[in-house]
Image: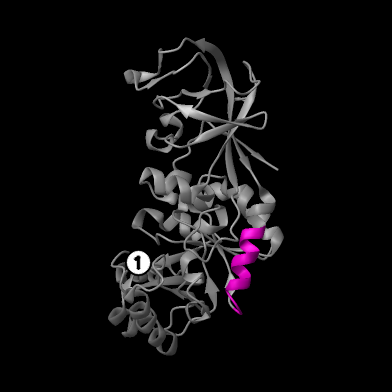
Amino acid sequence: MTADLPLRLILDGAALVANWRWLAARSGAAACGAAIKANGYGLGARAVAARLAGAGCRDFFVATWSEAAALGPLPEGAALSVLHGVRAEDMAAACDSPARPVLNSVEQVRRWREAGGGACDVMVDTGMNRLGLSVDEALSDVLAGLPIETLMSHLACAEEGDHPLNARQLAAFRPLRERVPARRYSLANSAGVLLGEDYAFDLTRPGLALYGGQPGPDAAAIRPVAAIAAQILQVRTVAAGESVGYGACWRTLTEARVAVLNLGYADGYRRALAAGSWAEAGGVRCPLIGRVSMDLIAIDVTAATAGEGDWVTIPLDLPALAARSGQSQYEILTGLQDRFERHWR
């Protein structure tokens, strides 16, 4: 990628580590892992893994074997699991990789056995009806003798702490611990950690909260990790009564200074995110104005001393953006595209 792009993600490594440590403390006696799929939720999986491993994290999760290969070697003592298991097309890569597959179906179990595969993880569906063996399948002899490192399930409604499905899934998972041999058992994602130690078992698997997302009202300690920095391409003076941007949907009341930034929906900054958002220029909050276009957006810098070539910062308050835009925190974060340089501090 060409260096010195006019668009950056400013990433706070100390906040990332602090979030993991907070989640680890909330996990009680359970180990605390990290989901780094989707390229570390868009922040850069290699950089995320290195920082969290340095803090003591030893269990990492990606979605696919291509993500596992892109991650490269993990730090000494760390383990990687591939959540989508093994298709027939994955077997060569899986057998050559130090990563473990998370087996999700009877067919995947059979395929792994026939290939002479070793240690693996197994997903059991306890009520989400997504990936995983059924509880009945897991309690049959289909897993007999399989060297299972982690038996896991996934909560569907953990963000709603009082949702009855949480308790039903917990009740369905407990017998699996008693009857299916594995070295560890895991149920809780980020929001599941907030449900309490009953859900932690031996290993928790947070994702969103590591990166500054808040999975529930009890997560106020979670710190933002990412912010956008965009360079001003041009500053223009717009006369009173003139419009800015597509559709002429924003008009000046008085003469205004308008800065145009290299940021738009092709970068993952969707139109719905602009309403109520602002950029900071020299310590001054400058509202985003007009419509977000493909790769440009405007801000009102009338009150700021900002000029062409200067950089402004747009905070990524994920809960607030999600509430205003109707997008999920996950969509906002993982939607940020490859035209950003990623700068860790």
| Main secondary structure along the magenta-highlighted residues | helix
Residue stretch in magenta:
18-29
Percent position (x, y) of residue 107? 30, 68
Within 10 Å of the Cα at label 1, are there few (<14), some (14-19), or many (20+) other Cα atoms? some
The correct choice, above or below, for 106 with respect to 140 in the image is above
User: As rendered, which of 27 and 44 lies closer to the eye?
Assistant: 27
> Residue most toward the bottom?
178
**71 with respect to 326 (left or right):** right
Q: What residue is rendered at 41% in x and 31% in y?
A: 265
Work out which quarter of the rendered image holds the C terminus and state it. top right
Q: Is residue 173 magenta?
A: no
Q: Is residue 174 visible?
A: yes
Q: What residue is rendered at 54% in x and 63% in y?
A: 219
Percent position (x, y) of residue 288? 48, 29
The correct choice, above or below, for 239 with respect to 1 in the image is above
Q: Is residue 50 visible?
A: no
Residue 74 sits in quarter:
bottom right
**228 with respect to 168 (left or right):** right
Residue at the spot of label 1: 108
Percent position (x, y) of residue 216? 47, 63
Percent position (x, y) of residue 182? 48, 81
User: As rendered, which of 35 and 7 lies closer to the eye?
Assistant: 7
Q: Is residue 28 magenta?
A: yes
**264 with respect to 314 (left or right):** left
Q: Secondary structure at mark 1?
A: helix
Q: What residue is rendered at 44% in x and 85% in y?
A: 177
User: As rendered, which of 343 and 297 lies closer to the eye?
Assistant: 297
Q: What residue is rendered at 45% in x and 28% in y?
A: 264
Residue 340 sits in quarter:
top right
- Specify the amino acid type for callout 1: Gln
